[in-house]
Amino acid sequence: MKKITILLLILAASLTFAQEQTVSPAKKEKIKTFLKLTNVLGVANQVMDNMINSYQTYYKQVPAEYWDELKKETANTNDFEELLIPIYSKYYTEKELDDIIAFYKTSTGQKVIKTMPDMTKESMQAGQEWGMKLGQKVMKKINEKYPVQKEVIMNYPSSK
């Protein structure tokens, strides 16, 4: 009897896990629409192209035709899309996907998509600048309290 109970518990757990992994066709289509609207797969292609271009400059002896063929091979993002679907399904309900899709179809949503890469880049630069200034402040405060660290502060890259 004990073995049957354990077997049933394992079976129930397996079925629950399998259900969590299964994405309904309707939800799958919504996720694909979301990925298309936000150009996630296009960005993935861009990243791959950039990576191949950097290899191309390093491996100058490799013919251009090879790189072109490699770019064609990596342009198919279907496998990547299939990997993303369960991830997006985990974090968004169908209702949330409907809301997100509706937003991204508006002119404001399209503007968010268009401006996000530049905004992210500029925000990262601002974050670096802020971090450097904050780092200098912290180092100076440490020096005020513990003067023996002055040579460390003087050698800090942004304090010169």
Image: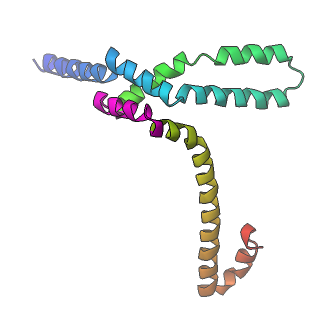
Residue 120 coordinates in the image, percent (x, y): 58, 47
> If the image is split into quadrants, where does the N terminus sit?
top left
Write down the region rendered in magenta.
91-108
Q: Quadrant of residue 127?
A: bottom right
In this image, 31 relative to 136: left or right? left
- The x, y position of residue 23, in whole percent, is 33, 19
Hey, which residue is sitting farthest left in the picture? 1
Please tell me in which quadrant of the rendered image residue 85 appears.
top left
Q: Residue furthest front?
A: 107
> Residue 17 in magenta?
no
Camera sees residue 104: yes
Which corner quadrant of the image does residue 33 belong to? top left
Residue, far right: 61
Q: Is residue 89 above or below residue 112?
A: above
User: Which residue is found at the position 43% from the left and 31% from the top?
Assistant: 105
Who's the residue at 76% across and 72% down the image?
155
> Is residue 107 inside the magenta stretch?
yes
97 left or right, relative to 160? left
Q: Residue at x 71, y 75 (%)?
A: 152
Residue 22 shows in the view = no
**Magenta stretch, overall SS:** helix
Q: Split into 4 quadrants, where in the image is the C terminus?
A: bottom right
50 vs 125: above or below: above
